[in-house]
Image (cartoon, rainbow, N blue to C red):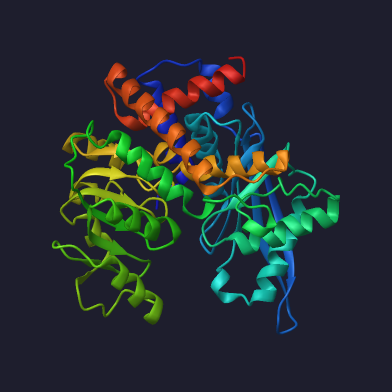
Amino acid sequence: MSNPFENALSQLRRAKAVQDFPEDFLTRFSTPDREIHISIPVRMDDGSLKIFEGYRVQHNNARGPYKGGIRYHQDTDIAEVKALALWMALKCAVANIPMGGGKGGVTVNPKNLSDRELEALSRGWIQKLVDVIGPKKDVPAPDVNTNPKIMAWMVDEYGKMTGDTSGAVITGKPIDHGGSEGRGTATAQGGFYVFEALQEKLGLPEVCRVSVQGCGNAGQIAARLWEQAGHKIVAISDSRGALANQEGLDREAVIAHKEATGSLSGFAGAKEITNEELLAVPCDVLIPAALENQIRGDNADRVGAKVVFELANGPTTPEADDILFAKGILVVPDILANSGGVTVSTFEWEQNLKNEHWTEEEVFIKLKEIMEREALGIYEKSQALHTDLRRAAFSIAIERIAKAMGM
């Protein structure tokens, strides 16, 4: 599998090909400000001591505190975390919010831990990084396999160690721990606002056939939002397999089946296919909402969609971008499509600092305004530069970060 950090650097170089930027800036921005490796000792339930490897990468803070989630996954490594931190810096600049880019992670399969072990691991991550994070330094959040409950443990540990009671060091917290209304659905909701802003400009029909790769938070909510707007979900997947039905899936029945059985397998109202086969399902919009490197040079020519809408981080490699572009398949890039999550995280941080609590309606009004404005700005930039939306988004982000760095 290709190195995600090398993919991110390749995307930077591709952006420079359509709009020139100072070489000194690109040299500086291609290296994180700081990479931190930590070891987290956890006393397991059987009495043994196990050491987990953790990370925090602080890529760039020219526009504000480092900002980015914490990922718990058995395949997480420093290359992945570095790529995600770079993309976060760009994503925050695309959304034009006052944050920089960072990312964290632990190499662990959390499904193998008890609740007590998971809490010890999460508090241990904070204990090792307490000196380098903070409301004005670095503000973590949830990511793959982390959730509001884990964020509550982390913000509690930070408060015990520092005396900070604002809660602004961590976002994605439960509502009763200072979390923001709307945060749980923000990634998909922000993505849907981007989709609505660009739907006509991308030549999509009024009613779209939609395939969703991924059945986690973003994927499930995206399927619900697109379906509620009148679109037809024709395929959906989880980590083990996928379902397809060109007549449209009964989304509620699919999710109920998965919750009851633990997988999509055995659902009666659709054909069972693989995740790879899902990419080839004929549709108007393919929404990758899982992990990186799903659309690659070896499978991009089989993509059956008119538009790839990236709710996941880094699902399309640079080689695949070239293939999709040659086929006339448009890509709405991750740093725009999924920036609703970090935008509402920033709203949460702001509310904590001001000791305020906004209604969900207030949150989504602010989110929609930002997502629509930046989506249309990126589309206009792509037209002006005669390029794709990813390079246009990178160009806008680079302009904003370079200006903040005085370069």
Q: Is residue 274 visible?
A: yes
Res. 376 image quadrant: top left
Where does residue 189 sit, x and y in percent of width and height? Answer: 41, 47
Vertical comparison of 362 with 157: above or below: above
Q: Residue at x 73, y 55 (%)?
A: 155
- Of residue 402 and residue 165, the one placed in the foreground of this image is 165
Percent position of residue 44, x then y: 71, 78
Q: Nearer the viewer, residue 50 or 345?
A: 345
One can see residue 83 in this view: no
In the rendered image of this protein, does residue 295 appear above or below residue 335? below
Name the spot of residue 72 as percent of width and height, x first. Answer: 57, 61
Residue at image point 67% right, 64% down: 52
Q: Is residue 303 left or right of residue 169?
A: left
Instruction: Give coordinates of residue 245: x percent, y percent.
Output: 17, 65
Q: Residue at x 29, y 73 (%)?
A: 253
In this view, 167 is above or below 65 = below
Quadrant in which the C terminus appears: top right
